[in-house]
Image (spheres, grey):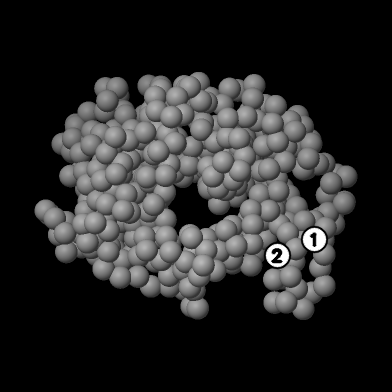
Amino acid sequence: MKKHPALGKAIPSMGSTGSIDGNNSIGILGTRNWQRETFENAWKISGNAMLEQNLRIGHKACSSCIARSAIFWKARCGEYAGIVSRGPEYETLYAYGSILENDNPDSIIAADRLSDELGIDTMSTGVVIAWVMECFEKGILTAKDTDGLDVVFGNHKIILDMIRKIAKREGIGDILAEGVKVASERIGKGSNEFAIHVKGLELAGHTARGLKGMGLGYAVSSRGGSHQDTRPGAERSGKLDRAVIEGKPEHVLKNQRMTAIGDSLILCRRHAEPFFGEYLSEKYVELINLLTGFNLDLDELNMIADRIYTLERMFNCREGITRKDDILPPRFTKEPIPDGPSKGMFIRPEELDMMLDEYYSLRGWDIKTGIPTQEKLIELGLV
């Protein structure tokens, strides 16, 4: 593990912040509420730039972890000087940085710390603020709606105020605290067209347009717009062609088997993916058998994973979530990426439908509804 280029060097040095430069270089960095996927000032909020500015002051680790990926950053300039946070990681640099067109790393450190203190998620909060900024841009909201705050793209000075409003449900924060789905439904005026969520959960910092398998993964995720049910690594690294839909349903299913088992083991993704692999394998079988005393084989482990994910699906179906909800934000199915290395990429509705058909078939779920079939439930021992 210590010899691994990620686990042994990059992650202990800067955590996941190096993904800012990497994603921006191939044109898949969420920018300006995903209107674009390249940010011209991305380098200013990258891990490399923060290291050069001497913002890293230390790191810590989970027990016995050799990656030591929890980096402590300290703001150095302006009104944020002296604020220390465990983070930001990549997702927060996206949520309080590129998606807001904010290139001030000190403000992101301060926003990360404040979010931790108030107990709110940085990704959901950043995506909600980005939505407000686009509402301002389109004239749907004005400063009258935000107690005079100029909530426009690139204005880092209002981020902390918006976080406080959301956490305390003050003014417009009372609506925004419900999330972007509910907020866009209440505000209306077409704002749902650029509300970036799946099943009510705001999207993480991984593209659904430039990684088509990731797009399917978001759509069928048990929890909505999460990057922890399907992972972006195989497509982002070039192991899989990110521009095609062929093979993606099988990839998503196999990758979800790994994440379901990983969640059950409480196994860190940063170790699992580079060291054990993106799919379940004999490495996982050996790990589990050594830890538990079980005598599982790979087929049995795959069935356990399918049982977990199908049970999650059954819960969702009971709550009324079916194929009609396995969709993506309109921005990703109607608007091609406008510029950059991934220019022109998006997921056409018919492409998503084709992938869903194949995915449901592989899962043993009804193709028309996305509901697990009785036969599959019997096979998995769930009835």
Q: Is residue 65 above or below residue 344?
A: below
At a point 18% along the width and 35% down the height, the residue shown is 150
For the image, the number of numbered tags is 2
Q: Is residue 249 above or below residue 122?
A: above
- Which residue matches tag 2? 284
- Which residue matches tag 1? 298
Q: In 3D space, how far apart are the residues under numbered discs 1 and 2 (Cα atoms)?
A: 8 Å
- Comparing 106 with 160, the one in front is 106
Q: Percent from the top left, x then y, of residue 285?
A: 75, 66
Report helix, strand or loop for mark 1. helix
Quarter of the picture holding the N terminus: bottom right
At a point 21% along the width and 57% down the height, the residue shown is 53
Residue 136 in sight: yes
Q: Percent from the top left, x then y, of residue 260?
A: 66, 56
Q: Is residue 273 above or below residue 206?
A: below
Task: State the image quarter where residue 75 is shown.
Answer: bottom left
At a point 39% along the width and 39% down the height, the residue shown is 24
Three-letter amino acid code at the position of disc 1? Leu
Report helix, strand or loop for mark 2. helix
Q: Is residue 281 above or below residue 193?
A: below
Quarter of the picture holding the C terminus: bottom right
Q: Callout 1 environment at 10 Å: few (<14), some (14 to 19), or many (20+)?
A: some
Q: Earlier in the sequence, mark 1 or mark 2?
A: 2
Q: Which mark is residue 255?
A: none
Q: Percent from the top left, x then y, of residue 6?
A: 48, 60
In screen coordinates, is 176 left or right of 335? left
At a point 60% along the width and 62% down the height, the residue shown is 275
Residue 34 in sight: no
Three-letter amino acid code at the position of disc 2? Tyr
